[in-house]
Image: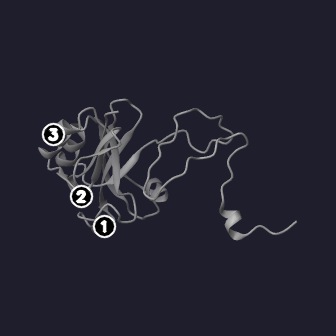
Amino acid sequence: MGHASKADKLLIKPAAGARPAPPRTRGQFIPKARTRRPVTRRVTRGTATTRLATAPDTAATAFFVELGLQPQGEAPAEGEWVDRIVGLEGIRVDTAMMETPDGNGRLELVKFHAPSGPDGDRDAPANTPGLRHLAFAVDDIDAAIAGLRAHGGELVGEVESYKDIYRLCYLRGPEGIIVELAERIG
């Protein structure tokens, strides 16, 4: 029996009985089928909260309320327990928790008062490493864009159709946050 090549070790083998994936061309996105598969090892049950280091002020909150998120409350946080979780000393923050209309997603806007951190690039492009955008499904992308523009939102590019399935766009909001809007059309 010979040794497997480095390339063979990097290949992910499909599960027994699985259909082979269709061929892809460069840049082509093929959505996965929405079927339930038996879970053999559960790592996560879902997304609990997405945290954005931003000011939970009127502008940021209003921007996300315009998208349909519901404010759930505001609270300060500080102390050794927060320091141990975040891995920084002397944390003092104000937070505003928001929830998506379906109740399945939560967004936490966090303003760090201490310790001070580096200023981010509010105009960083979408290909900058790190968490660059949040995506939201909307019923009417044009109405969502108009509403977000009233709260300081600016299109990053253009509204485009993807294979008559979605209309998509990126908008930059308060603190340089990029949101993607997706309206299902097909």
Residue in the foreground of this view, choosing between 60 and 17: 17
Label 3 neighbourhood size at 10 Å, few (<14), some (14-19), many (20+)? some
> Which element carries disc 1, helix, strand or loop?
loop
| Residue on which disc 3 sits | 147
> Which residue extends farthest top?
102
Position of the C terminus, as image quadrant, is top left
| Residue on which disc 2 sits | 176
Question: At label 3, which amino acid type do we have?
Answer: Gly
Query: Mark 1 or mark 2, which has the lower sequence index?
Result: 1
Count of marks, rendered view = 3
Query: Mark 3 or mark 1, which has the lower sequence index?
Result: 1
Residue at 37 percent of width and 59 percent of height? 91
Residue at 67 percent of width and 42 percent of height? 41
Residue in the foreground of this view, choosing between 149 and 36: 36
Residue 120's spot in the image, x, y percent? 28, 66
> Which residue extends farthest right?
1
> Which element carries disc 2, helix, strand or loop?
helix
| Residue on which disc 1 sits | 116
Distance from the alpha carbon under mark 3 to that under mark 1: 33 Å
Residue in the foreground of this view, choosing between 1 and 107: 1
Mark 3 in CB contact with mark 2 (< 8 angstroms): no
Q: Nearer the viewer, mark 3 or mark 1?
A: 3
Residue 159's spot in the image, x, y percent? 23, 47
Q: Quadrant of residue 131?
A: bottom left
Distance from the alpha carbon under mark 3 to that under mark 2: 17 Å
Residue 107's spot in the image, x, y percent? 35, 43
Question: At label 1, which amino acid type do we have?
Answer: Ser
| In this rendering, position of residue 96 left or right of residue 148 | right
Residue at 32 percent of width and 60 percent of height? 126
